[in-house]
Amino acid sequence: MTATFEACRAKMEAESIAESAISAFEASFNSLVSGATGIIGEDTISPAPDLVDATSISADPDTSLLDKTVVLKLNGGLGTGMGLDKAKSLLKVKGDDTFLDLTAKQVIKMREEYGRKVKFMLMNSFSTSEDTQNFFKENYPELAEEEGLEMLQNKVPKLDRTTFEPAVCESDPSNEWCPPGHGDLYAALVGSGSLKSLLDNGFKYMFVSNSDNLGATLDLLILTHFASTDAPFMMECCVRTENDKKGGHLAVRKEDGQLILRESAMCADEDEPAFQDITKHRFFNTNNLWIRLDKLQEIVDKSGGFIPLPMIMNNKTVDPKDDSSQKVVQLETAMGAAIECFAGATAISVPRTRFAPVKKCSDLLLLRSDGYVVTDDYRIQLNPECDAAPVMNIDSKKYKLVEKLEAATEGGIPSLIQCTRLVIKGTVRMSKKCTFVGEVTIINNSDEAKAVPTGILENTTVDLTDAPGLGPLKPVVVASAPIDGQKPGTSGLRKKTKVFMSENYLNNFVQSAFDAVKASGTDVSEGTLIVGGDGRYYNDKAIQTIIQMGVANGVKRFWIGKDGLLSTPAVSAVIRERGPVWQKAFGAFILTASHNPGGPEEDFGIKYNCENGGPGPDKLMNAIYSNTTSIRSYKICSEFPEIDITAAGNTSVASADGSSEVNVEVIDSTRSHVDLLKTIFDFGAIKKLLDREDFTMIYDSMHGVNGPYARTIFEDELGQPESVNMNAIPKDDFNGGHADPNLTYAKELVEIMGLDRTGEKIDVGDRVVPSFGAAADGDGDRNMILGTQFFVTPSDSLAIIAAYADTIPFFKTQGGLKGVARSMPTSGAVDLVAKDLNFDLFETPTGWKYFGNLMDSKALYAGKDYTPFICGEESFGTGSNHVREKDGIWAVLAWLSILASVNADTSKPLVTVEDIVRKHWAKYGRNYYCRWDFEGMPKEGANAMMDKMRADSAANTGRVVGGYTIATADDFMYVDPVDGSIAKKQGVRFLMADGSRVIFRLSGTAGSGATVRMYIEQYEPDPSKLEMKVSTALEGLVAVALELCDIKTFCNTETPTVIT
């Protein structure tokens, strides 16, 4: 077979891979095509001689060597063999500490102990870099900020097993690459410039070890010994035992007397008995290496820029998850094999305390158990009470993947401190109440995981095959496959109801969410999961499905809103406020499509909120979406009984074997939220306003979820007649309406308040129009505020609430409002208030999660405290830091508080909503503002329109259109001041020289089609021009906007569905 390296070189150069790595891979490639197998025959080697015992070193430790030494951890492994798809080092190994936690703590402790800032480095791979860097930034920022912390491992092409050409994977091109093994250490040091930098800065010695070996710390005594030998390279070895006989060993090459490393892949079948003879080949490589950096540079220079290491060949498939995909060869090298490249290299025998790696789930179970302890310097070592580590023989087929071990130890880790041998055959469920003593064997030949008896099991064999199982709590694994289009938008996943009702659609998303939540570190078996929604069609069925899947995924406690109802802000309130502490919610599924229509032919939606009460952050949402693209099955307890959600109360369901119990509590939907609101507002003052004879109000819940909340507050708490509430009975199709609180869809309320769909007054004759009107959307998080024949824009509403914040006890008693924020498309009205009253001000992308970060700046990120805090969006969303969602009824009570404060003297004429707004305009000027919504637009055309505007940004900047000069045309990008995250493509902006703005966004909340939102704003400070009709004031700017976007061409219309 003739194969050349040119295609590989071209592919690697196209990825800007360093020449040192290309040369190293070329050497391996040439070995492959030459027919070399990498086999080291038994007749070519002799056993390694006796080694220096590290415990016998008598030299005085030399601390000055620390200034010349760098510690490097290899952190490129994903642990795919254990079913992981993130850095293996992020696995929890002891309590809540991961491998990287303990590594970081080792470094910090070492620096404290020696009083020297010993240099620390990581060699990450392209697969682990992002996760690792984020981990250090979040948990150990002082290490993350150090220069040269990361050195990136190279990547090499997978090769077709027949032609040796670079493999191709069209479904996922990233599968075409693989790590080149930890032998890439040397090429990475050279190619990254790290080796030169280290030498230039006076570093002479490097200690290298695997990130999953927590016994491998910088030992000053061993370092002193290494320096005294003047050896260029030293390998730490351990004496082989029966458990190590299949691993590589140290040997001497007969040809030149050079120490070499022979791995199992380098051993011929006929030599296997000798290979496994631990009396002959006594030492194995721990992969703890000591390297003289100056000598490494000499070898690199001599070899032409790389170290020629022996090739290791692995047969794989190009897609590791698809056995039918292209058969490939992956070429690797081992860093320990470099021992044969250093003349004068040596080795040292170290105790087992310096070798505690995790290669399989049995290793992980042992390390997590009490058989190992964490020392004061954060090393993991065998518990002193153990004579020897127990021999672990757990079913390798059943427990190959970490997720299987997690399921088996969901109840905790059993005690192994007195165990000498543990054998597990079949799937079991252990707990921290199990103690294994001596030799214990557990057998289960059934297809269901069985519970291991609690208490002490001593020198015994337990057969669980015929033992009772979980009964109604038994999870069933149902095969599935990815379904396109499950990427959550700004407020969760929304599609047509029938899509959600189709086979596996809801199940896939819910399972993907559980997997992502658990992967983020949340223990779903502790605390409570909340489930509720806006009552739309399919709500009841979806709740039962989520409960059954939650049980299968380990959830032990649920709170379900009565009748399945929980408004979005109420869910946030329940998460944050409802106790007791040991039952606190860890998250919630909210079943809502917000203001979208409901019914079997309309929309349904689902979103996940986290333990702070707010929507899941981008990182979690991206993880959920990623999971939906690769899901192969979901778990469900199909025999779990249906819960009656029509009555409050608790249902307990126990497993057949008595090992587990699940509690489902149907809770009062309104209590937590209403109780919280009563602490925020002065209900007495509001009641005094509502009781005035010259004041009347009407609140339209639009047959959404907010009806019960409105009735509880206005009728039960404030003593108002039933007539103040309209459309207060939730219906699964919102009574055929569109539960969106704006001038178009809340037409019944708008007419009662004496307005038309444009906000202009209509002839009401002799009819008395209420003093105050408000509306809520389907899930209760939006609001519309109206006065007598007067519409308050959401932007003005936000600004006025901020200006009058001290009328609300929540703000006044905390020293006043500190910060305000608005979404980018929202008008700048609140900016003027913030500047006047010296509030911190933020402009964010659309999406309440961005406000949540600002609210939690101090509590979660140890940053500045911006609370008390008010925020809002032009899409009728307003709220504060009392919850982490916008809160429609909060905004209504805020306005009633303002009205109560300016009408405290009941002997005076009523100060109206209109009076308050006009007074505000007189002081701050008026932001003329409107939003045009083009709903149901073809997605292809809408996306093309947005892309065209983005592409023309530079050309449009400075352009004059319709008398307006475009000072800046751009695509809004947001750098979060709290966590540093970046949100791109958040809206195309045209910022005019006179301060006017034109903005375009595609909504992420539409159930079908695309919604193009066009925002128009013009600020007017002239008191003589504050009474213009909005349509008149903005007529010229609207024409400019339509010209700039050319929506007529792309979407075949210039007529909006809704004008706000």
Image (cartoon, rainbow, N blue to C red):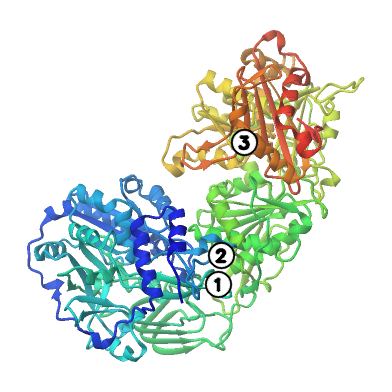
Residue drawn at the location 61% of the way across and 40% of the way down: 847
- Residue 726 rendering spot, x and y as whole percentages: 82, 38
Q: Earlier in the sequence, mark 3 or mark 1?
A: 1
Residue under circle 3?
A: 951
The residue most toward the left is 59
Dot 2 and dot 1 residues touching (CB under 8 Å): yes
Which label was assigned to residue 169? Answer: 2
Of residues 668 and 277, the one drawn nearer to the viewer in this rendering: 277
**Callout 1: 10 Å neighbours few (<14), some, many (20+)?**
some
Q: Vertically, is 199 above or below 289? A: above
Q: Where on the picture, by quarter, is residue 486?
A: bottom right
Which label was assigned to residue 326? Answer: 1
- Residue 369 shows up from this direction: no
- Residue 453 shows up from this direction: yes
Does dot 1 land on a helix, a strand or a loop?
A: loop
Does dot 2 land on a helix, a strand or a loop?
A: loop
Q: CA distance from mark 3 to mark 1?
A: 39 Å
- Residue 7 rendering spot, x and y as whole percentages: 47, 62
- Residue 769 rendering spot, x and y as whole percentages: 84, 24
What amino acid type is highlighted by mark number 1?
Answer: Gln
